[in-house]
Image (spheres, helix red, strand yellow):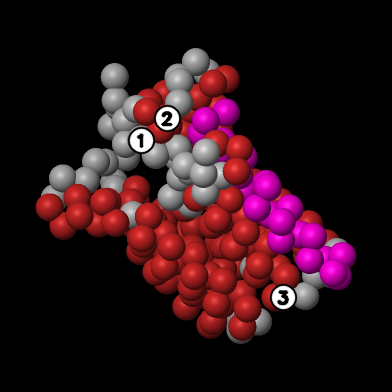
Amino acid sequence: MNATDLFVPLGYLLGSVESAILVGRLLGLGDPRARGSHNPGATNMLRLGGRKAGALTLLGDMLKGLLAVALARAFDAPPLVQAGTALAAFLGHLYPLYFGFKGGKGVATALGCLLGLDPLVGLATAGTWLLVALVSRISSLSALVAVLLAPGFMYWHRAPRPLVVATAIMTLLMYWRHRSNIRHLLAGTEGRIGERDD
């Protein structure tokens, strides 16, 4: 086994650290998987605990994806290993080893991975999310639009093929994880950013 291959399992272990659950415990909010939307992500934490809880969760989820990929890049891992590390961190968030394989939907972690793989692509994806969020005030719609464009951003920036493929796989998995949100969007019942669950 090549030493750089160790970054793939390391990525999964980092991704398995669920920021929302840890923040929920730290702030006395309980397990976010049992309240609100039942999703351990920044949007649900924003609803449950306000801006501090949401911001800490967002930052934690982004950093674990960014850190996993940044470590692989720092050791000059080839693009295939970088892509595998990003996917592993993303899957760790979706199916965390430490929390019964019941994780979040992966938006912030994917963004962290993209920032690590290609900062310009990550910034373009984040900018897309922000633009749609400002117009719609709907987090899930913003995420779905941003991740749909992310593989195209990666391709247009002439990233190595493994990075484009990894981004496309993350997009498909996020659409699968957001299938209930898609139903709510189509029905016009999806919640908006900032709504509290008291």
Give the residues drawn in magenta, as a range: 1-22
Q: Which residue is mark 3?
A: 79
Q: Position of residue 165 (x, y in %)?
A: 55, 77
Q: Which quadrant holds the C terminus?
A: top left
* Residue drawn at (55%, 61%) of the image: 123
Question: Going from the N terminus, do you reach mark 2 or mark 1 first?
Answer: 2
Res 128 visible: no
Locate the N terminus and report the quarter of the image it occupies.
bottom right
- Earlier along the polypeptide chain: callout 2 or callout 3? 2
Q: Amino acid at mark 3?
A: Pro
What residue does disc 1 label? 38
* 5 in magenta: yes
Amino acid type, callout 2: Pro
Q: Is residue 126 visible?
A: yes
Most common secondary structure along the magenta stretch:
helix
Question: Counting residues from the N terminus, which is met first, the one under dot 1 or under dot 3?
Answer: 1
Q: Mark 2 = which residue?
A: 32
Name the residue at 72% across, 75% down: 79
